[in-house]
């Protein structure tokens, strides 16, 4: 089983709709969870981090963490054409001693349709 | 402006040639990372460094080398031993401290073998 799994998509939503992106992870010890957005040919940019069970909202974005189910999601409300990108889920895992390691999923391509 | 810079943006390598990718940050971050991204895949860790004059292998270190002589700089050399080096290379740095484990990425270098 992969450590961090995402559906590769593409996920297609109409402009103005809610986009729901999902991610599962394999290690219960993980403390930190991140969503990055990556436009084609560009580097990832952080859009949300979440550390506690429940929801965290930032503008049109809501990250949800369910540790019992080892599940993270990202909701994007009022989707805009500029939200079209690949969304990478990342989980910080313990990696020996005091070192942690950030593991990325393969990303979900979101296509917002006009 | 604070940030992470990578150069060059595009790099072409001939078979059997070593090339060095530059990564510089002025964020005063201790930890720096090199990742490789192939089409349709997530980011894979090549090397990381938590402090000056110390670095550790990641998951795919074979054919790569690094140095960390200054806090600000973490160059990556792609050697001729790396058989499939064509990829998008991303450098990241991390702001440490409690719950401050967010990695920030440079703009990336796209390496192509001719």
Image: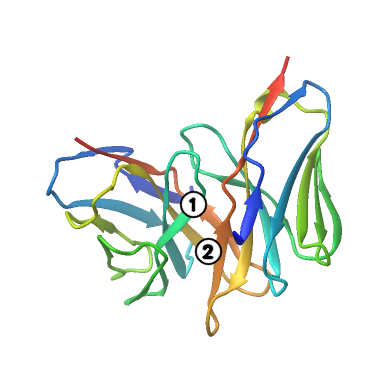
| C-alpha distance separating marks 1 and 2 | 16 Å
Look at the numbered discs 1 and 2 and tell me whether their residues touch, using CB distance below 8 Å: no
Numbered mark located on residue B43 in the image: 1
Is A57 or A10 nearer to us in this picture? Answer: A10
Rendering quarter of residue B107: top left
Crowding at mark 1 (Cα within 10 Å: few <14, some 14-19, many 20+): many
Task: Estimate the x, y position of residue A73 in percent, counting from the top left.
Answer: 77, 49
* Residue that badge 2 annotates: B94
Q: Chain of mark 1?
A: B
Is A7 or B12 nearer to us in this picture? Answer: A7
Q: Residue at x 17, y 54 (%)?
A: B80
Task: Estimate the x, y position of residue A39 in percent, counting from the top left.
Answer: 55, 34
Rendering quarter of residue B50: bottom left
Q: Is residue A16 left or right of residue A2?
A: right
Residue, far front:
A1
Closer to the camera: disc 1 or disc 2? 1
């Amino acid at each position: 089983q992969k450590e961090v799994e995402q559906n590769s998509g593409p996920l297609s939503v109409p402009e103005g709709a809610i986009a729901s992106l999902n991610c599962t992870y394999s290690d219960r010890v993980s403390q930190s969870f991140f969503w990055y957005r990556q436009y084609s040919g560009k580097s990832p940019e952080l859009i949300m981090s979440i550390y506690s069970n429940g929801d965290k909202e930032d503008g049109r974005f809501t990250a949800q963490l369910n540790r019992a189910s080892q599940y993270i999601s990202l909701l994007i409300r009022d989707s805009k054409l500029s939200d079209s990108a690949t969304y990478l889920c990342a989980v910080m895992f313990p990696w020996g001693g005091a070192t942690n390691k950030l593991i990325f999923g393969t990303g979900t391509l979101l296509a917002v349709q006009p | 402006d604070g940030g992470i810079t990578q150069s060059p943006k595009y790099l072409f390598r001939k078979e059997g040639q070593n090339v060095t990718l530059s990564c510089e940050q002025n964020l005063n971050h201790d930890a720096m990372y090199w990742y490789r991204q192939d089409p349709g895949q997530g980011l894979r860790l090549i090397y990381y460094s938590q402090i000056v004059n110390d670095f550790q292998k990641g998951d795919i270190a074979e054919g790569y080398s690094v140095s960390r002589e200054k806090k600000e700089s973490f160059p990556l050399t792609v050697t001729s031993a790396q058989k499939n080096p064509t990829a998008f290379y991303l450098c990241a740095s991390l702001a440490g401290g409690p719950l401050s484990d967010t990695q920030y990425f440079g703009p990336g270098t796209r390496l192509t073998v001719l």
